[in-house]
Amino acid sequence: MSEKQYKDESEMLYQGRVVKGMDFGKPEAMPLFTTAAFTMNSMTEVKNAYANGFTYVRTSNPNREALAQVVSFLEGGEKSLIFSSGMGAISTTLMTLVGPGDHIICNSNIYGETFDVMGKLLRKFGVETELVNFDDMDNVKNAVKPNTKVIYSEVCANPTLNMCDIPAAAKIAHDNGALLMIDNTFTTPIAIKPIQLGADVVINSLTKFMNGHSDSLGGSITSTAEIIDAIHPVRMLTGTPGDPNASYNMFKNFETMYLRVSREQASAAKLAKALEDHPHVSKVNHPSLVSFPQHELATKLFRSNEEMSGMMSFIVPEQEDRFDDFLSRLHFAHYAMTLGTMRTTLVHPCTSSHSHMPDADRRKMGITPGMFRLSTGIENVDDLIEDFYQALKAFD
Ligand SMILES: Cc1ncc(COP(=O)(O)O)c(C=O)c1O
């Protein structure tokens, strides 16, 4: 056996062809297994199927398993599970990890529906969640209680890109017998591998950058074999496994992930700088920028400025009567309630993800009515810059 370490982008293609535990040769393209069940002709076959094979689709499926193995490789974790959505992954995992009387510390800068799983669903079952600002890790340390079981954050938060100091959060969690769960959706394992930095559980909404084509819904959890084996039966009971069709589709789209996501992340760094230099843009939030308050942390945790995130947000003048003109002038970027797709997309947080919050609370988080969130696509970055510059003339 060769001990040679290949680059991830090469090795993931190899890993995708040789799916461990699946006895159907090494097809050049992964076949789709839509079957609800696998058939057996003897009790010996039944026992083998329960131990290592495939029985019923909600329990196990080759397309889901193939995708899980690639995610485990990318995240550098022992095992992964594929879910029906990012939210399916988050809710099923938290239901496994906490119970009545337990306490979660959650970054206050978090995807709203993730917080609702904790603040609305888990609360009904006696789980207490405390929202804490992770900009200062002392806040996290001071929030720890004897019953703290999980510390939860995204690598970069929506829409301000505020970062979590993953090694510091991991130390606080582990010093206190808790687990650190990190959402890598905005950044992907191409930019950062939270498990290598101390996280215990990593969630990805595959719906976004990793699938990248806006044509499937899915989520993943990567962790130790022990934790994944505990989540698996809960996934069966909650009925949240990924659909075979979606897993098949995402597996296919994963094969171009490095080409797409590397380009999106590099373009984001260049576009962020260009937007920052535009006189109508008062602020750009992207970890690659020297002006980003946690730029030093970003350069420590990410490999380079070009490998951070395809996401950013920027602030234009609060002249809402000009927004229609600005958006309709854009040739490439368009408004869409998603992110991480191949085409550049925008959203306006104050009227979408953060519309439920009072203006004063949003402003405290740096989310003002002039803010747009941007997800960079694979268009030529110079075309994108030129396009934004001509559209920003709407504020002349
Ligand atoms: C950071 C983050 N995590 C999780 C999710 C949930 O993912 P899904 O829509 O696949 O359920 C989203 C959705 O936008 C997200 O932005």
Image (cartoon, rainbow, N blue to C red):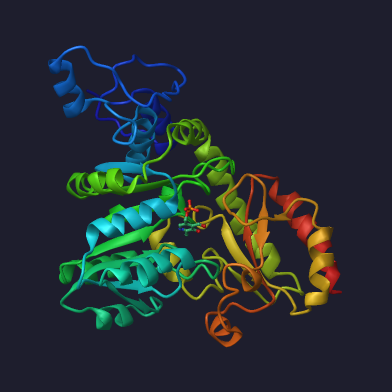
| Residue sitting farthest toward the bottom | 360
For the question of whether residue 242 can be seen, the reply is yes
* Residue 292, placed above or below residue 312: below
* Residue 307, placed above or below residue 4: below
Q: Quadrant of residue 272?
A: bottom right
Along the line of sight, the residue nearer the viewer: 257 or 289: 257
How many labels were placed on the picture? 0
Q: Residue at x 41, y 51 (%)?
A: 204
Q: Is residue 190 left or right of residue 259?
A: left
* Residue 293, placed above or below residue 230: below
Q: Quadrant of residue 124?
A: bottom left
Residue 350 x, y percent position in the rendering: 63, 74
Residue 239 x, y percent position in the rendering: 35, 45
Q: Is residue 270 left or right of residue 79?
A: right
For the question of whether residue 192 can be seen, the reply is no
Along the line of sight, the residue nearer the viewer: 300 or 93: 93
Quadrant, the N terminus: top left
Q: Residue at x 41, y 68 (%)?
A: 115
Q: Residue at x 56, y 74 (%)?
A: 291
